[in-house]
């Protein structure tokens, strides 16, 4: 199943990056997590609510058309203020 998910993420990333979005983020959540909505929700006025232990479980993967990097999703959110 993991391989299928990775292939699907790659296809979505290639489709979206550039023409539709400038930044594509993959959150590496624990295997038993059902959906990101249970761990993270964006609120109005640049606010968010998150279950930190889950969102910080593993580095997120960030992609633009020209570069990619791994890092903390919560730190990225703080920097985006």
Image (tube, helix red, strand yellow):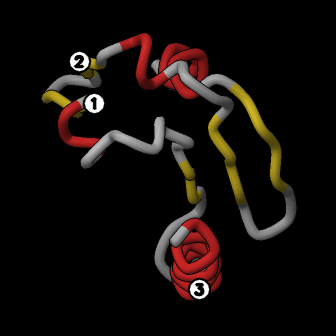
Among the two numbered marks 1 and 3 on one chain, the one whose residue lies closer to the N terminus: 3
Q: Is residue 67 left or right of residue 36?
A: right
Residue beneath label 2, please?
Answer: 49
Viewer-proximal residue, 81 or 74?
Answer: 74
Vertical comparison of 60 with 4: above or below: above
Vertical comparison of 50 with 73: above or below: above
Picture quarter containing residue 79? top right
> What whole-number distance in Å separates the C-alpha atoms at marks 3 and 2?
29 Å
Find out whether the residues at labels 2 and 1 contact each other: C-beta distance under 8 Å: yes
Residue beneath label 1, please?
Answer: 40
| Residue 13, image x, y percentages | 59, 75
| Residue 9, image x, y percentages | 55, 72
Viewer-proximal residue, 35 or 66?
Answer: 35
Residue 11's label in the rendered image is 3
Q: Going 82% across and 53% down the picture, which residue do you hit? A: 68
Picture quarter containing residue 4? bottom right
């Amino acid at each position: 199943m993991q391989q299928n998910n990775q292939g699907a993420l790659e296809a979505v990333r290639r489709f979206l990056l550039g023409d539709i979005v400038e930044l594509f983020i993959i959150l590496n959540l624990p295997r038993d997590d059902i959906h990101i909505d249970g761990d993270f929700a964006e609120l109005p006025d640049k606010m968010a609510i998150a279950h930190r232990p889950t969102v910080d479980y593993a580095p997120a993967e960030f992609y633009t058309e020209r570069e990619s990097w791994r890092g903390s999703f919560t730190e990225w959110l703080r920097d985006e203020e």
